[in-house]
Image (tube, helix red, strand yellow):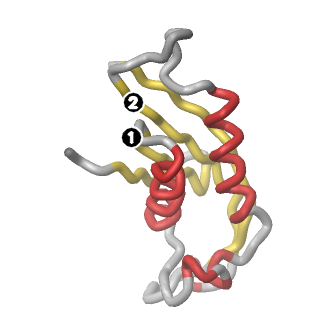
Amino acid sequence: MFEVKIETSFSSAHHLLNYKGKCENMHGHNWKVEVTLRGNELDKANILVDFKVLKHEVNDIVEYLDHKDLNELPEFSNESPSSEFIARYIYKKTKEKFIQTYRVDVWETPTSRASYFEEG
């Protein structure tokens, strides 16, 4: 099994719905995103997925989120844009481009991370 990972980041604001505490108020994060792909087969250059291609596609996804109020985006309408929800959103968008997508980790602080992956 081979695994490749890339990191990127974006900044955005959000507030949590159905939550009691400080995070129900508008606030922002400098989100760090790690995308992991896994697979058994390499291409003719012995590469699972070209890092440059993966970074480009993932950066297109996070660029859409960058410097936005996530609560105002249609994809998060009437949803609480938690770190878990954001990780799933990025996972599903990445999976549309790369079947080997295995996991997405999203850090809202240097010590707090949420992950999304699908079993099976």
Q: Give the quadrant of the C terminus.
A: top left
Image height of 6 relative to 69, above or below: above
The secondary structure type at the circle numbered 1 is strand
Mark closer to the chain start, 1 or 2: 2
| Residue shown at 44% from the left, 62% from the top | 84
Q: Which residue is mark 1?
A: 102
Question: For the view shown, which residue lies furthest in the front direction?
Answer: 44
Q: Percent x, y for residue 71?
A: 62, 82
Q: Which residue is mark 2?
A: 38
| Residue shown at 39% from the left, 53% from the top | 116
The one of 63 and 110 positioned closer to us in this rendering: 63
Give neighbour class at mark 2: few <14, some 14-19, many 20+ (Cα, 10 Å): some
The secondary structure type at the circle numbered 2 is strand
Place residue 39 in its image quadrant. top left
Q: Percent x, y for residue 54?
A: 62, 36
Tag 1 near tag 2, CB within 8 Å: yes
The one of 77 and 41 positioned closer to us in this rendering: 41
Give neighbour class at mark 1: few <14, some 14-19, many 20+ (Cα, 10 Å): many
Question: Of the residues shown, which amino acid type is indicated by label 2?
Answer: Arg
CA gap between label 1 and label 2 equals 6 Å
Question: For the view shown, which residue lies furthest in the right direction?
Answer: 67
Q: Percent x, y for residue 56?
A: 71, 40
Question: Of the residues shown, which amino acid type is indicated by label 1?
Answer: Tyr
The one of 44 and 52 positioned closer to us in this rendering: 44
Residue 71, numbered label: none
Q: Give the quadrant of the N terminus.
A: top left
